[in-house]
Image: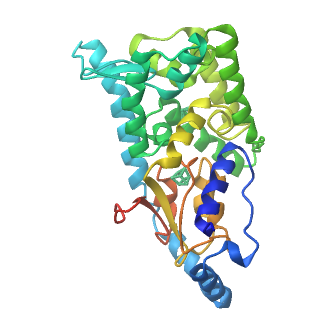
Amino acid sequence: MTTPLQRRYVDQILVMLGKEPAKPRQAGEFTARAIKVHELKRMTNKADIEAAKEAHRANERNHKWRNRRWATLIFANLLFVVSFYFDIQILEGALTASRFVGFHLIDLNSALQVMLAHKHIITNLLIGTGTVLVLWILVGGRSFCSWICPYHLLAEWAENIHLWLVKKKLVTDTPIDRRLRTVFWIVFALLAIVTGYTVYESISPTGIISRALIYGGSALALLWVLALLVFEVFFVRRAWCRYACPIGLTYGVVGIVTPLRIKYTVEGCFHEGDCRKVCLVPHVLDTVIKGRAVDTEVPIGPDCTRCGLCVDTCPTGSLQFDVKGLAKLM
Ligand code: SF4
Ligand code: SF4
C-alpha cells in the first residue's frame, strides 16, 4: 500500500521527464491532515486573504539565497581561472573535467557521454565521477545548475530582461513541450554511441563558457552561446535549460535521492503563486496551487535546481530549504 507522498514522489520523476503535473482528485490521494487544511482554507474569508497577500507583497523582496548563490557560482568559476593563471593548482581543468587539490572531478554528463562514445566503462573516469556523484547526491542534483553552471548565471540575467520585455508587452513567451529535453538527452546519447564522439560537448554552453573563462574561447562557440541568450531574451524563456540541456536532466536524476530539497508547508500559504512566477521550472511547484498539496508538508521534486528564488520570494515562508531528517536549515 503506497502513501500519497510516495505516489507523488513517482509522479515528480515523471514530471521531470516531461509529463504535465496532474491535480490529485480522489480523497485517497491526500493525507487526512491535508484534507483538513484544505477545508479550513475554503472556509476562510476571501477578502481577508487578499488583504494579507497585498500586505506581504508590499514588503521589500529579499534576495538572500540569490546573492549567496551568485557569490558561490562566481567564486567556483573564478577559482578555475585563478588556479590556471597563477598556476596554484587548487582547481585545475574546467567544469567538464578537473582536479581539486589532487582529487579528480568529472562532470557526470560528460563522463557518461565519453563512456557511451568509447562503448566501455573507463575505470579512471568512474573514479572521478564517483567523487562528483557523492557530492551532488549530498547537495542536491540540479544544485549544479543554479550554484555552479556559468551559463545559468547569464541565462538568469537574460531571463530578467525577457520578463521585463514581456511585462512591457514587447515580446511574448512561447513555451515548448518539456518532453523535448528527454528527447534531446536520448539523441545526444545515441549520437555519442553512433559517432564515437562526444557531440554534445562541442555545443554545451556550460563547457564552452567554462573553457572560455579559463583558456579563452573560440569565436564561433561564443557566438553560439550568444545566439542562445538572444533567443531566450526575445522568444522562449530559459529555452536551453528548460527544454534542451541534457546536463540538467542527468543531475535531475541524481537529485531523486538527494536529502537536500525545498520543502513546502501548506498551512500558511496564500496560493498567490509568486513562487511559480520566479521559478525556472514551475512544474515542480504545482503542489502550491490551491487544493493540490497531498500532505501538509510536501518535498519539491528532483527537477528543482535549489536556486532559492522561491524561498526568497514566498511572503509566508511556506517554502524553505530542508535536509531530509534534519531541522529546517535557516
Ligand atoms: S540546465 Fe544545463 S545549461 Fe542550464 S544551468 Fe543546468 S547545466 Fe547549465
Ligand atoms: S522550486 Fe524554488 S528552488 Fe526549486 S528551481 Fe524553482 S524557484 Fe528554484
Q: Position of residue 162 (x, y in %)?
A: 65, 42
Q: Residue furthest left?
A: 88
- The residue at the point 52 percent across, 58 percent down is 310
Name the residue: 44% across, 11% down.
216
Q: Quadrant of the N terminus?
A: bottom right
- The answer to which quarter of the image holds residue 193 is top right
**Position of residue 167 measured from the top left corner of the image (x, y, whole percent):** 69, 51
Q: In the rendered view, would you say 227 is above or below 313?
A: above
> Where residue 228 sits in the image (x, y, percent)?
65, 26
Extreme-front residue of the structure = 1
Is residue 213 positioned above or below 179 on the image? Answer: above
Within the image, what quadrant is residue 103 found in? top left
- Which of the two residues, 46 or 266, is positioned nearer the viewer here? 266
Q: Is residue 305 visible?
A: no
For ligand 1, the image quadrant comes to top right
Q: Who is closer to the viewer here, 138 or 42?
A: 138
Closer-to-camera residue (257/142) = 257
- Residue 85 appearing in the image: yes
Q: Residue 34 at x, y = what percent?
A: 60, 79
Q: How many labels, in total? A: 0
Kindly indicate the quadrant of the structure image that contains residue 47: bottom right
Q: Residue at x 43, y 49 (%)?
A: 66
